[in-house]
């Protein structure tokens, strides 16, 4: 028992033992996983911009260059990122489903069933998080393209390339 306690408290080779265990259990992954900005679905920024290049991009109005400049500043400038995130998360994205009752269109039970189905759809879509993400992409790129996909009760909006 005394030997076990001594082994527990022996920190002489602790760093070496951790390094060896990590080397044995290491999973090879893509080098792009170690990005400066973390995971992002957009292409990495190619280069830094000089002031003259920025002015030329703004004057020319080239959409692709403006998008790359916007993504660059979102990743490198905390003020720009905070402003984009603030604008994207400012709305609450609350939703209200209002049933419309029409005597000719169906019975009260059918309308109630359709109302609950619409409420479940909105709940499964997770509007506050989904619309905040979409708004962030829209502010950064100037446009958002997505397609609504359903699989049973699961609902998601799949991003399409810009």
Image: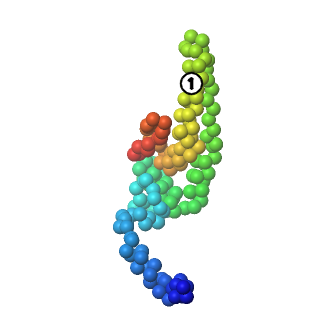
Residue 121 at x, y percent in the picture? 53, 34
Task: Name the residue located 52 percent from the left edge and 57 percent from the top edge.
Answer: 74
Task: Name the residue located 48 percent from the left edge and 62 percent from the top edge.
Answer: 37
Is 128 or 59 nearer to us in this picture? 128
Question: Is residue 59 shown above or below 112?
Answer: below
Which part of the image, by quadrant, shows the C terminus?
top left
Which part of the image, by quadrant, shows the N terminus?
bottom right
Q: Residue furthest front?
A: 1
Residue 27 at x, y percent in the picture? 37, 67
Is 125 or 51 nearer to us in this picture? 125
Q: Secondary structure at mark 1?
A: helix
Is 30 or 135 nearer to us in this picture? 30
Residue 63 at x, y percent in the picture? 43, 48
**Dot 1 surroundings within 10 Å: few (below 14), some, or many (20 or more)?**
few
Task: Name the residue located 44 percent from the left edge and 64 percent from the top edge.
Answer: 35
Question: Is residue 55 shown above or below 143?
Answer: below
Residue 30 visible at all: yes
- Left or right: 34, with 127 as reference point: left
Question: Is residue 126 shown above or below 72?
Answer: above
Which residue corresponds to mark 1? 113
Colour convention of the picture:
rainbow
Number of labels in the image equals 1
- Left or right: 46, with 140 as reference point: left
Question: Is residue 86 shown above or below 146?
Answer: below
Residue 160 at x, y percent in the picture? 41, 43
Q: Residue furthest top?
A: 104
Residue 57 visible at all: no
């Amino acid at each position: 028992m005394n030997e076990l306690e001594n082994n527990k408290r022996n920190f002489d080779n602790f760093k070496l033992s951790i390094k060896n265990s990590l080397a044995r259990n290491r999973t090879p992954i893509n080098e792009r996983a170690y990005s400066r900005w973390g995971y992002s679905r957009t292409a990495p920024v190619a280069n830094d911009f000089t002031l003259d290049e920025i002015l030329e991009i703004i004057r020319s109005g080239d959409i692709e260059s403006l998008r790359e400049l916007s993504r660059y500043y979102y990743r490198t400038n905390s003020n720009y990122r905070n402003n984009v995130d603030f604008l994207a998360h400012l709305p609450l994205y609350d939703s209200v489903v209002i049933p419309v009752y029409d005597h000719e269109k169906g019975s009260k039970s059918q309308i109630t069933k359709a109302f609950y189905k619409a409420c479940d759809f909105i709940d499964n879509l997770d509007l506050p998080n989904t619309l905040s993400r979409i708004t962030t992409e829209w502010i950064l790129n100037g446009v958002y393209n997505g397609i609504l996909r359903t699989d049973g009760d699961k609902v998601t909006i799949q991003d399409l390339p810009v």
